[in-house]
Image (cartoon, rainbow, N blue to C red):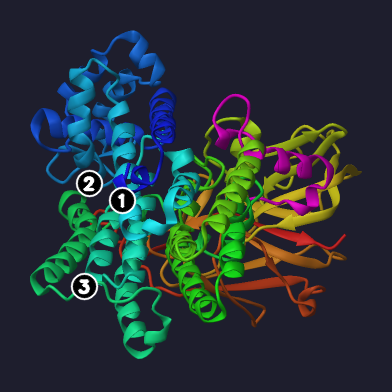
Amino acid sequence: MPRTVFASMALPRRIALAFVCAAFAVLCLSKARLIGDGMEYLMMAQGFVAHGSPELRRADVAALAGLPPQALARGRLQPGLLDAAIPRIERDGEIVHGFARALDGSIQAIHFWMYSLLAAPFHVLVTLLGQNPFTGLVLLNLAILGLSAWRLQAWLPTAGLPGLGLLVLMGPLYYTAWAGPEVLAGCCVLLATLAALRRDLPLSVALAGLGATQNPSIAGLIPAAAAYALLYRYLPSSALFPASRAARRARDTLLVIAGCVLALLPYLHSQAVFGMPSIIGRYYTDPGLIGPERLFSFLFDLNQGLLIGFPALLSCIAIVLAGLAPPRRRALLLHLAIASLLTLGMALPALAAVNWNSGAIVVARYAYWTAMPVLAVCLAGLAQLDPRRRWLALGAAVFLQGLAAWQALPARGPAFTQHGRLAAWVLDHAPRWYNPDPEIFLERERHREDLATHEQVEVHRGPHGPSKLMRFWSNSGASGGLCATGTHLASEDVVTLASGWRYYNAPLRCAAGAAPVMRIAIGQDMPAILGGGWSVIQGGAVWNVGPRATLRLSLPPGRQARAIGLDGYYYHGLRRSRIRVNGIDLGTHALGQAPLDLPAALAQAPVLEIAIAHTTAPGPASRADPRALGFFLHGVQVEFAH
């Protein structure tokens, strides 16, 4: 704890504060569990200690298996899973439990190793003390938080205890016990932004580079530091702090180089080890997810959205702005706008993550560290307020974050596998107002982590019966057991997400007859719908070969076509295609996701001639398969007006 805080406190208060800090550390250590990517980071730390590399070896798994049974149970450690995974990784090249086969045949974690390297000394310490090794990761988080508190007090001494309280409340309170790099990322972003505000731009670059080793979009703060330099040069009145030191060329140059190298290291490592710049980017992100719906989820989701999980951020902004004189308020508003842009800029790449719900505690992991630029500006403003307003800001933050935690945290079990109180109430009584990301709905309804597949159907049952059903658009015949044979699910309020998942909101009913759709599954007995640009049928699907393909659908008489969907997926590297139906350009779309609405001019058309042109020309699939594979079609579905 910074000495300047203790220097202004009476001895009883110092003892009380030390007791609170110790209690927080003990609580975090007692709550520590290995979830998410924690096994990867633990095994890499074990590798650094045992043989000086992050490589996973059988001896590392044996060391884990040698722990006492109670230690394995507490950490939910299952060495047998890794024992069984190693042969699959070595033989088949699969990615299992976050580990993959490298080019040289070794087994490496898909996440970068910097966090585990920093954790290695703590791993040694807890092992020597006979404690669970995964608590070393939590000790590292506590150390990072302590260092951040020290720097915060040194840089903003007048912020005092309210500033330190806000630092802990806004993320570390929830994620310090998490065996992963969220606290590292959050503290790096916070300190990098504060360094930029204090006009120490080289240090800002270095801290951004360190954070980017675990969350690459943090590297966006590096060019932001250059933008801050231009801002202070051409608009000096915008500076919140005076220039605090003379430039030290050697120190500044080394910091900038270190930051840039650190930001590049994960890509260089992945290229050298796996033969691609980012193995996670290739297999565990989907740029098609980046869009308004994901951004809305990031900000406003009732279970884990930034503004829902961090209400204290808004109260702090309001109190700080109200307490500043007009000239300082205008400067702070400018920096709040910049910080908001930095938050959104770092968030946009993260929106492509496929594990959107995993590990969220009160607020999404991505929302925690991306929100830190705004908190940094708030802390800079807080330091300029009188003590009464500073404590008011902390009191409001404690109340609001306590309320957010109460509504989000369940009595038992992980928070990310259960709906919060607010989300549950809305789903029970006003389901049309909450249509979350499909992963959030699926995992919190099933109370476990799960992979969303197009065959799944999930029903939310409120106190008055089923109130919401989610299914993929192509799974139009499934009703989750709600409707009998010969009927189909119907609702007056149906919401189709861009990803193709659909929500049917109460009141739900079962209408007589089949659903108003025509589905043609690919197979030997299907009608002749394939035109040019298709390969041979493989079981229940067929590859499009080349940059273009056509389909021809004959529709039943008397039906009005409303939408058309192609069920399937692209080959690696392809994302979107331009679609024309009967010569009418429908624009560029990602096939396999939401159905495409047809214009009124096509409603009465007896035949639909569909022309597909990929925006990127496909290349050869592999050396063994020279075909230029484009889209793997499983079926076509036409939706009719009721």
Q: Residue furthest front?
A: 10
CA gap, disc 1 and disc 2: 7 Å
**What SS does tag 2 mark?**
helix
- Depth order, front residue of 325/497: 325
Location of mark 1 (residue): 214
- Per the image, the residue denoted by label 3 is 245
Give the image location of residue 382, x and y in percent. 49, 61
Where residue 24 appears, x then y in whole percent?
43, 31
Nearest to N terminus: mark 1 or mark 3: 1
Type of amino acid under label 1: Gln
Q: Residue at x 53, y 44 (%)?
A: 357
Q: Residue 392 shows which numbered tag?
A: none
Instruction: Identify whether 431 is placed above or below 199.
Output: above
The image quarter containing residue 179 is: top left
- Would you place residue 533 above or below residue 178 in this image? below
Circle 3: element type = loop
Question: Is 418 displayed left or right of 235 in the figure?
Answer: right
Verify whether residue 417 appears in magenta.
yes
Residue placed under numbered mark 2 in the picture: 114
- In the rendered image, the vertical position of residue 583 relative to residue 506, given as above or below: below
- In this view, the residue in front, 70 or 54, is 70
| Quarter containing the N terminus | top left
SS at badge 1: loop
Quarter containing the C terminus: bottom right
Q: Nearer the viewer, mark 1 or mark 3?
A: 3
| Amino acid beneath label 2 | Met
- Say whether marks 1 and 2 touch (CB < 8 Å): yes
Of callouts 1 and 2, which one flags the residue occurring earlier in the amino acid sequence?
Answer: 2
Q: How far separated are the C-alphas under marks 1 and 3?
A: 31 Å
